[in-house]
Amino acid sequence: MAGTELYGSEQEPARGGDGDAWARVRSRLKAELGDEVFSCWFAGMNLEAIENGTVTQSVPSRFLKSWISTYYRDKLTALWQAESGQVRKIEVVVRTAARSRTDAVVEAAPKLPLRAVSPRADEPRGEAKVIRPASFAAAAPAPATTSAIEDAASPLDSRFTLGTFVEGASNRFALAAARQLAEGPRASGVSFNPLFVHAAVGLGKTHLLQAIANEIREKRPEVKVLYLTAEQFMYRFVQALQSNSAIAFKDALRGIDVLLIDDVQFLHGKQLQQEFCHTVNSLIDGARQVVVAADRPPIELETLDERVRSRLAGGLLVEIGAPDAALRRAIVERRIEIARLQHPNFTVPEEVSDYIVRNIATSGRDLEGAVTRLLGHNQLTGAPISLAMAEVTLKDLIRGTDQRKVKIEDIQRVVAKHYNVSKQDLLSSRRTRSIVWPRQIAMFLAKTLTLRSLPEIGRRFGGRDHTTVLHAVRKVEGLVATDEALAQDIEILRRMLDN
Ligand SMILES: Nc1ncnc2c1ncn2[C@@H]1O[C@H](COP(=O)(O)OP(=O)(O)OP(=O)(O)O)[C@@H](O)[C@H]1O
């Protein structure tokens, strides 16, 4: 048990020693949880290493890490401890960041409290959302009637309304579609179905979806509307399977008039995707409305089954883009107004608002978070808001935003120089290795350091197809995890782009 073996991919057979132990833990997990639950959460889990009493296991997404850590850590720890008394803790890491120091350590320790409400604007940035409504805490399976499903829906944040959503050029189309849906089908019937809203983090997808639900509840209470995150959809489904109430659950879901599913990029598991697809199909066939949100367009939802992707792509696709300066200013001003309702003395000089608008360019969440921080600082210290104070208080928010301002042209220039090729080579159709490799690295950096989509990156690299970019990203991502020299090279390039 003392040795360290690495199992880079799920397909690799477990070999002796640690591999055998993992194979036994896997089969016990499967026996205890059942095939469906096991394949939903654990099929993609690999053993990375066993060292000094710590078992390191990797999963392909932050959502899975979070989910397994929350719901299955005790079971996993107990099964490993049954294999060897030397095991003290289980570390779950995300595969692409397998060596990240910030990854959670799952110890045989008391559980952390779970959030019972939606995350707020001022919560830490970039964390995968794990919302667990209070009703999910009960061990007893919920009866799968329509009203039980509605009761178990994600709590809606009453601040998220169409009225509080600030309109700008980048979200006008999405807001118009949301308004029309909230008003109800026109005489001509449902006009676009499903509505698929996609945007980078913090640009208002959840706000818009919940606003549709809030508006319908208020104006048309007879309409059955259900808002669920993809993770809650999965959780409810697995719960229904475990309590043999899957059929009733499906029937109840299909009785919903407007189904809103958020963060669909987190939908995992073959059967769950099939069920999701059936649900979407039957709702649409029955002229019920489906609204889906994700952090990327359907074509880029690589973990989703092809059928699900094409179903989602078959309706109206709306992107919320990065906010322009006018929209950023309007969001900041609205947030200040809201803060002043409770703290009438809260005053933000114009030069500070300008500073926020100029420097936080990509996310509504960050803009709101900036105002919240200034307010907190002001209330705690009593110091008036000044530019110098804002520069210090908002330093990390602004640094984080800077990273996202990297341009594709800069990446191409820096990579070309580093690998001693020309920028034209990177954009050309030449396929010699000395050019293909830097091109793939540049595509990887473009995907990880900018908010550009795969098709757009493809276009910017000499009109290549998005699958070529995807291949490059996956290849470099896979190698970075195992090749230290390459990881260092990438880090150097990142730092050069940071300056
Ligand atoms: N146009 C806007 N008007 C008002 N508030 C906005 C707007 N865009 C974003 N926000 C605010 O920014 C915060 C983050 O928005 P939201 O949670 O909806 O983003 P998201 O796109 O769902 O992000 P994620 O991908 O992280 O889930 C919320 O508090 C939301 O109210």
Image: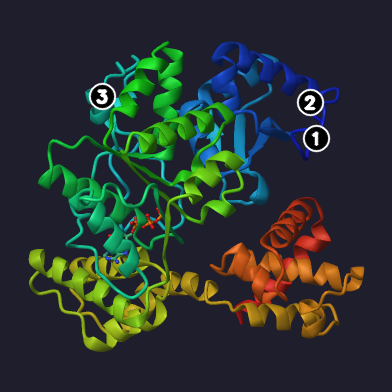
The front one of 206 and 188 is: 188
Q: Counting other residues with Cα less than 10 Å from the Cα at mark 1, is it few (<14), some (14-19), or many (20 or more)? A: some
Q: Is mark 3 within 8 Å of ligand 1?
A: no
Q: Quadrant of residue 145?
A: top left
Q: Secondary structure at mark 2?
A: helix
Quadrant of the rendered structure where residue 245 is?
top left
115 or 214, nearer to the observer:
214
Badge 3 density bin: few <14, some 14–19, many ≥20, Cα 10 Å: many
Task: Tell me the quadrant of the picture where the C terminus can be found.
Answer: bottom right
- Alpha carbon distance from label 2 to label 3: 47 Å
C-alpha distance separating marks 1 and 2: 8 Å
Q: Residue at x 46, y 48 (%)?
A: 128
Q: Earlier in the sequence, mark 2 or mark 3?
A: 2
Marked residue nearer the N-terminal end (1 or 3): 1
- Looking at the rendered image, the disc whose residue lies closer to the viewer, 1 or 3, is 3
Tag 2 residue: 18
The answer to whether the residues at label 1 and label 2 have Cβ atoms under 8 Å apart is yes
The reply to whether the C-beta atoms of the residues labelled 1 and 3 are less than 8 Å apart is no
Quick check: 180 left or right of 67? left
